[in-house]
Image: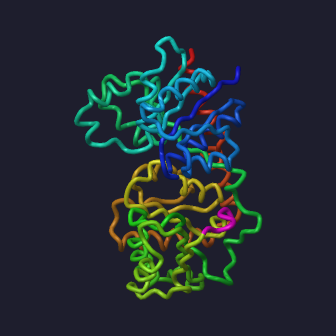
């Protein structure tokens, strides 16, 4: 198959899950031999990450109408076969591309639909008239488009993760019972991520440990790793003390970047994603599974879509006491499982969530539109 030239346009000004998806989509397509040009806004984390990943990067000051002449000039210079859009401003600019162009345009929809879009479906449909495919990271978002009558085709392609980085770490030993097994929450400190609520659940769980079946099992601890965003380290530590948990023993808090995330995730006995909202792309849950670590997820957004047989469990819709009991059973199982089980979990996750798999799915969609 002839290599295609694919232009990624992204107006996000921060390193969100959508930005991560865009960068990984470009990497995934390059793995399959296609040529990508990545165009973020200048001086943004997206630009920094694109350059770090050695993507062919051509940045814009912005994607407003004043940039249209440069946008059109670049379009004619790059001559893309495909354009993938990740936001509204760049989608608007593409309305003014030459009508005789044969370029295929994909629009990535990384957030749940706003109520405004559903209340005014005609406006939403009109704004997407020039789009050939709506690309979604989860079935949940894809299904939200079912109520629309005049939209382009909708397809689901989940995020792919670099399995050269996220894989079972050779130096990891999650079965080292000379120290307390770690239940790990990994990600920025933000109220939407549910740290406070899970600390309460963990405190309830810890009061009932050890399980009667095997009272010799080591006492787990909760390890929270993340950079402060809308919660400070002090606030988080106050939440820990409120539940009479011991800092540095029952709960560990790490608020700096770790040198080797794969080692951290591989050493955990259980990965927890306790988010209260969003989670349509689910990168962290995928990273845990690629490292062989089972997950315990809140079930918001698309989190349950990452679960496969043996991947872990969701506690969506359950009371705190029921979640604490479910957590106990899952930790007991994860502490006593074999390394073979973890390797099998990582292998299954790799088939689903690798960059190679992501690239193959994207190319399938592009080839279908090219017919």
Q: Residue at x 46, y 23 (%)?
A: 132
Q: Position of residue 289 (x, y in %)?
A: 60, 56
Residue appearing at x 46%, y 60% in the figure: 297
Image side of residue 284 versus residue 51, left or right: left
Assess whether residue 135 is covered by the magenta stretch.
Answer: no
Q: Quadrant of residue 255?
A: bottom right
* Residue 275 visible somewhere in the drawing: yes
Q: Is residue 219 above or below residue 147?
A: below
Given residues 217 and 263, the one toward you in this image is 263
Query: Where is 176 relative to 304, above or below?
Result: below
Image quadrant in which the N terminus is located: top right
**Residue that sits furthest to the right in the current view:** 170
Image spot of residue 171 (x, y percent): 76, 68
Q: Position of residue 60 (x, y in %)?
A: 54, 38
Front-most of residues 47 and 268:
47
Quarter-wise, where is residue 241 in the image? bottom left
Image color mode: rainbow
In depth, the one of 343 and 104 nearer the eye is 104
Residue 133, given in percent of the width and then of the height, sits at 46, 27
Q: Is residue 265 left or right of residue 139?
A: right
Q: Report the residue at 59% width, 33% height from top.
A: 361
Going by the picture, which residue comes out furthest to the top? 100
Q: How many marks?
A: 0
Magenta residues, start to end: 257-263
What is the quadrant of the C terminus in the image? top right
Among the 4 quarters of the image, the one containing residue 326: bottom left
The reply to whether residue 282 is visible in this rendering is no
- Compared to residue 102, the image places residue 210 above or below, namely below
Considering every residue shown, the one lying at the far left of the view is 119
The residue drawn where x is 54% and y is 53% is 283
Horizontal side, residue 262 vs residue 118: left or right: right
């Amino acid at each position: 198959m002839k290599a295609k030239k694919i232009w990624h346009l992204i107006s996000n000004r921060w390193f969100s899950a959508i930005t991560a998806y865009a960068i990984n989509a470009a990497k995934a397509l390059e793995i399959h031999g296609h040529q990508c040009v990545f165009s973020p806004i200048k001086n943004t984390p997206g630009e920094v990450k694109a350059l770090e990943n050695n993507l062919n990067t051509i940045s814009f000051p912005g994607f407003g109408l004043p940039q249209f002449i440069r946008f059109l000039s670049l379009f004619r210079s790059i001559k893309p076969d495909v354009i993938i859009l990740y936001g509204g401003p760049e989608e608007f600019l593409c309305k003014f591309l030459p009508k005789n162009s044969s370029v295929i345009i994909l629009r990535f929809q990384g957030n749940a639909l706003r109520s405004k879009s559903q209340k005014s479906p005609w406006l939403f449909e009109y704004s997407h008239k020039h789009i050939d495919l709506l690309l979604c990271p989860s079935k949940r978002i894809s299904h939200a488009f079912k109520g629309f009558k005049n939209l382009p085709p909708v397809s689901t392609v989940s995020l792919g993760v670099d399995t050269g980085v996220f894989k079972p770490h050779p130096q990891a030993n999650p079965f080292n019972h000379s120290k307390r097994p770690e239940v790990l929450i990994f990600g920025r400190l933000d109220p939407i991520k549910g740290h406070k609520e899970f600390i309460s659940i963990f405190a309830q769980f810890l009061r009932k440990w050890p399980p009667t079946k095997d009272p010799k099992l080591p006492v787990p601890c909760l390890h929270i790793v993340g950079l402060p965003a809308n919660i400070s380290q002090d606030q988080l530590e106050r939440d820990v003390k409120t539940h009479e948990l011991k800092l540095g023993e029952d709960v560990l808090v790490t608020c700096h970047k770790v040198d080797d995330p794969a080692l951290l995730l591989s050493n955990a006995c259980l990965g927890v994603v306790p988010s209260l909202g969003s989670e349509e792309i689910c990168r962290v849950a995928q990273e845990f599974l690629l490292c062989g670590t089972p997950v315990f997820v809140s079930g918001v957004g698309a989190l349950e879509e990452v679960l496969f047989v043996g991947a872990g469990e969701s506690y969506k819709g359950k009371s705190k006491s029921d979640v604490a009991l479910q957590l106990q059973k899952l930790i007991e199982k994860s502490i006593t499982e074999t390394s073979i089980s973890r390797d099998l979990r990582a292998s299954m996750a790799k088939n689903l969530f690798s960059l190679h798999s992501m690239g193959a799915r994207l190319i399938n969609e592009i080839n279908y539109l090219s017919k």
